[in-house]
Amino acid sequence: MVLARVLLIVVALWGQAGPVRGASSGVTICSCDLSPGNCDLNCCCDPDCSLSDPTSVFSSCLPGSTKAESLVCLYSWLIFRNNTPYTTTLVGSPPTQLFCVLSADASLNYFVTPQTVNASNFQSISEPYKGPSFSAASQSVPVFSSFYKAGDPVLTVSASNALNVLRQPAPVGAQNLCSDNSPAKFLLSSSTVCLRLFSNLTDSCEKDLSLDPAYYYQDIAVLKVPAGVSGQGARTVQITSPVTDRPILLGDQCNNVVSQVTYTVLYNGTQGISSVSVDFTLSNVSITSTSIQQNTTVLYKSITSAASSSVQTRSGNPGYLTGYPVLSNNGNLLLLRSLVGESCSYSPVQFGINAVSGCTISGTAQDSCSSFQARAYQILLGGNAPESLAIYGNVTAAQSGYWTQIIYQNCSSQGTCSSGCLIPVLLNMQIMWAQVGLLSNPQAQLLGGYFLYTCQSVKCQDLTVLQTQVSFTDLTRRGPAPRGSRGITDRDPVDFFFPFQTNKAVTNPRSLLLYLALYCWLIMQVVRSV
């Protein structure tokens, strides 16, 4: 028989409310009395102090130097574990759970000789406190709100009525491997890129669920609102997709492998999610490959703007928010190229976050220098070169006056692919911004962008690393602090003849108005006399 371990949790609560009737009242041993014959500072139980009320002399009392209150209560959630036979107390209206310690004798403290435990009385002493050393946490029923809020996970129900969340694979680790434990957050449209690894694609082509489009939508229903958990049948929408192809092994290729997943979620305010559709980009992968890059995007659209061909993405309203994408005029976000596995991928440039990324490029000796150079530009910029950046985070394409021009410094077209072609190997995006508006609520505004290329002569057939750097420079000019704030000393004049006293400081607005009125009156009298 295994003896239960006794876990003693001692809660020492020393009250300091109210006067102390004696310097050593209710404290058997004064633990802070360190100087015999002298009164120790803030030691309220030191008999050398000989004070009837130490709290009137000391600014505070050291822990353990005052008597315990007769009844001290704490909120029950502050207690990690209570293995005593005493339970919490319900008080107040509405009732609040409190853990209360009742001291029958104020002299009780840590220094009282504890009860002797031996073989004869061990069972009787440990009986009220025994129990498992670690008890399983109670499985509480989650409480869901009546509608989705921004940032809430989107809830789903499987064909077996199991409650889950809509997954958005996210990259983890240095290799950016896919993790399927990341939930999609309501109203937070985002895109993730990660790497799927497999040891033998011949075996996993038709068996690996992550490569099959059906894995992402079949037998999955989305709850319209979180409160629909109690009525799943009437408050769910099925995820639909026009793609019906399945992975199939044909010769030395695995066809119809998922390389991109795009969820589109239509919502109607607090009424919840109206519909969910998913589209795929399928690729054919050689059976000798050991990895595949997958891009997962979740887009949220209001049903009032669903018919629009483009969805306006806000990065602040109006000023940019740190971590949100920088908007460019080509209808897309300003992109940053990075290497994922054996291929390149894009990620949006995030406002206020300096970043460095890299990718690789290679060609053949038959390529022309101009085409190879153009491909390097396209890789560094992520597609079409943007011409301007949105000044604020909520600017639309129709607001022509709210865009700032990007200044480019390109490479000259020189050389040949065989001898050496001058191509851009480094793009330095320098973005200037400043805070505008009220000091209490400043808004971040973009002032301009300077895209500087560093060029290098390389051979087209060589593997060349292309890098992109993004740096944000704060050009905010701080105005003077408001009057009356810290750092400004205001002094009132000491007499009526203050303006004629050169050694006085002018700060009182009312006095200044009085003096100005007096000066104006004197000038008017002089003019009339003339």
Image: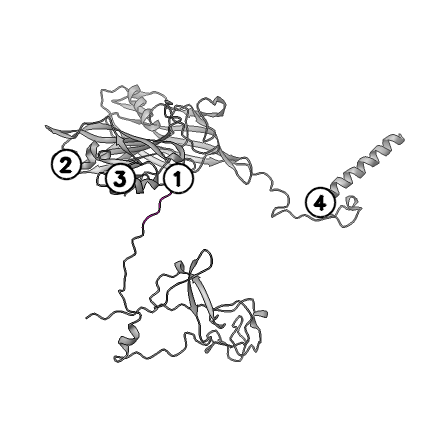
Q: Quadrant of the C terminus?
A: top right
Task: Nearest to the eye among marks 2 and 3: give it.
Answer: 3
What is the distance, in whole Å, between disc 3 and disc 1 at their CAs? 19 Å
Mark 3 neighbour density, 10 Å: few (under 14) some (14–19) many (20 or more): many
Residue at image mark 1: 149
Q: Assign a secondary structure to mark 3.
A: strand
The residue range painted magenta reads 141-147
Task: Nearest to the eye among marks 3 and 1: give it.
Answer: 3
Q: Is residue 312 left or right of residue 277?
A: right
Name the residue type under label 3.
Val
Name the residue type under label 2.
Lys
Residue at image mark 3: 157
Task: Nearest to the eye among marks 3 and 4: give it.
Answer: 3
Q: Give the total of numbered labels.
A: 4
Mark 1 neighbour density, 10 Å: few (under 14) some (14–19) many (20 or more): some
What is the distance, in whole Å, between disc 2 and disc 1 at their CAs? 37 Å
Question: Which color scheme did the rendering employ for the protein?
Answer: one colour
Name the residue type under label 4.
Asn
Q: Who is closer to the viewer here, 420 or 56?
A: 56
Residue at image mark 2: 207
Q: Is residue 269 left or right of residue 262?
A: right
Residue 143 is a magenta residue: yes
Residue at image mark 4: 508
